[in-house]
Image (cartoon, rainbow, N blue to C red):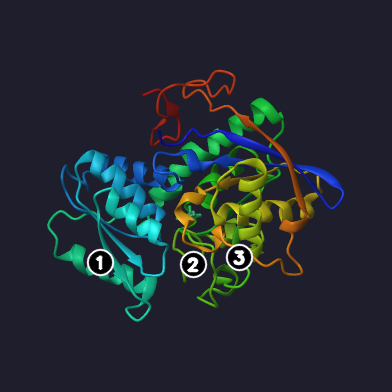
Amino acid sequence: MIGNTPLLAIDFEYRGRQRTIYAKAENLNLTGSIKDRMAFHTIRLAYERGSLTPGAPILEVTSGNTGISFAAIGSALGHPVTIFMPDWMSHERQQLVRAFGASIRLVSAAEGGFVGAIRLSEEIAAVTRGAFLPRQFANEDNVVAHEITTGPEIWAQLSGHAKRPPDAFVAGVGTGGTIMGVGRYLKSVHPGVVLHPVEPASSPTLSTGHKVGCHRIQGISDEFIPPIVKLDALGPVIGVHDGDAIVMAQKLAAELGLGVGISSGANFLAALDAGDRLGSDACVVTVFPDSNKKYLSTDLMREEPRRSGYAAPDVHLLRYRAINRVCDVCYDPDHPGDGPVQPTRAGRVTAA
Ligand SMILES: Cc1ncc(COP(=O)(O)O)c(C=O)c1O
């Protein structure tokens, strides 16, 4: 129920040329987002090291999806979970965290927003017996989760069906776990792959090094460059306008029935940009981090004005094919597995 998602090959026409972009359908994970991978592996590795013991409290700072993942997996394993979240995240996210049995501590901009939430969680953990802080922004396990699952899955699915290696991988940066982990794996098997981190054009934290402006692409660009992000290991940053990302996500839902969130629209447009840079027949891969259901109260569900310079209005979506989940033993996409992917510290994947 976590990971081993289908890879979508999405065919479309853009400014007179037919093109294809590949995207992992991460909306199909247990709680509907890519963060289930990180939460599951972080908890598993913490158990292995003894830093998390049965029944101990888990405290985490998140813009939403991570909190939902830790709440659900924590409940399943019998851990009380407290989530610290900026108070401007969508109501659906807050309600889901509570629905999965976790407590939530909203942090206002006046209390320091994201940075204030991190400070507060550390203070409370210091006086809570046995508390485990996953610290997703600084925890290398977040990178490892993608290095040993998302990356190998993309490689196996592409080699099985597209019969070609990826020329580029692009992903919006929240913690940076996805771009760093998938990037590290893909570089190890195909050093020529270009890795593009994605940020909101109106809030270019990666390019400037600090919080600037504001944006509506929830889940990415959280006010600072996370410690696990190593920009010198990555290619050029791609900026996407939040309105353009909203229009793109709306089109994916309305024209192809792919109900994905705003950062998925941003990733699609960044993949389009990466293809423009490399040549329109380049093999560009990305992820669709979550579904549109967490955005029912946001601008994703409203008419978004088309502004000049947007790319999404010129994208004519044609069709998509879902490339099989891979077998968790042999990685052959024509032989789908039926058990969870069980990573090992050595980075191999074995049957449960
Ligand atoms: C909707 C959404 N998109 C993108 C991301 C970014 O993923 P990562 O934290 O691996 O950089 C997140 C992270 O929470 C997210 O929730």
66 up-or-down from 23: above or below: below
Q: Where is residue 17 in the image (x, y as percent from the top left)?
A: 85, 46
Element type at marker 3? Answer: helix
Residue ranking furthest to the top: 335
Residue tagged 1: 122
Left/right of residue 288 with respect to residue 235 in the rendered view = left
Say which mark, if any, is on residue 168. Answer: none
Say which mark, if any, is on residue 225. Answer: 2
Left/right of residue 78 with respect to residue 37 in the rendered view = left
Q: Where is residue 114 in the image (x, y as percent from the top left)?
A: 38, 70
> Which of the two discs, 1 and 2, labels the residue nearer the N terminus?
1
For label 1, being within 8 Å of ligand 1 is answered no
Element type at marker 2? Answer: loop
Q: Residues within 10 Å of mark 2 (few under 14, many from 20)?
A: many
Q: Position of residue 299 (x, y in %)?
A: 54, 64
The reply to whether discs 2 and 3 touch (Cβ–Cβ < 8 Å) is no
Q: Which amino acid does label 1 sit on?
A: Glu
200 up-or-down from 32: above or below: below
Q: Position of residue 40 (x, y in %)?
A: 35, 42
Q: What is the C-alpha distance between the residues marked 2 and 3?
A: 19 Å
Front-lying residue, 77 or 347: 77
Element type at marker 1? Answer: helix
> Looking at the rendering, which quadrant does residue 10 occupy?
top right
Q: What is the C-alpha distance between the residues marked 3 and 1?
A: 32 Å
Q: How crowded is mark 1: few (under 14 residues within 10 Å), some or many (20 or more)?
A: some
> Looking at the rendering, which quadrant does residue 313 occupy?
bottom right
Residue tagged 3: 242
> Which of the two discs, 2 and 3, labels the residue nearer the N terminus?
2
Q: Is residue 133 visible?
A: yes
108 up-or-down from 103: above or below: below
Q: Can residue 138 be seen in this view?
A: no
Q: What residue type is labelled 3?
A: Asp
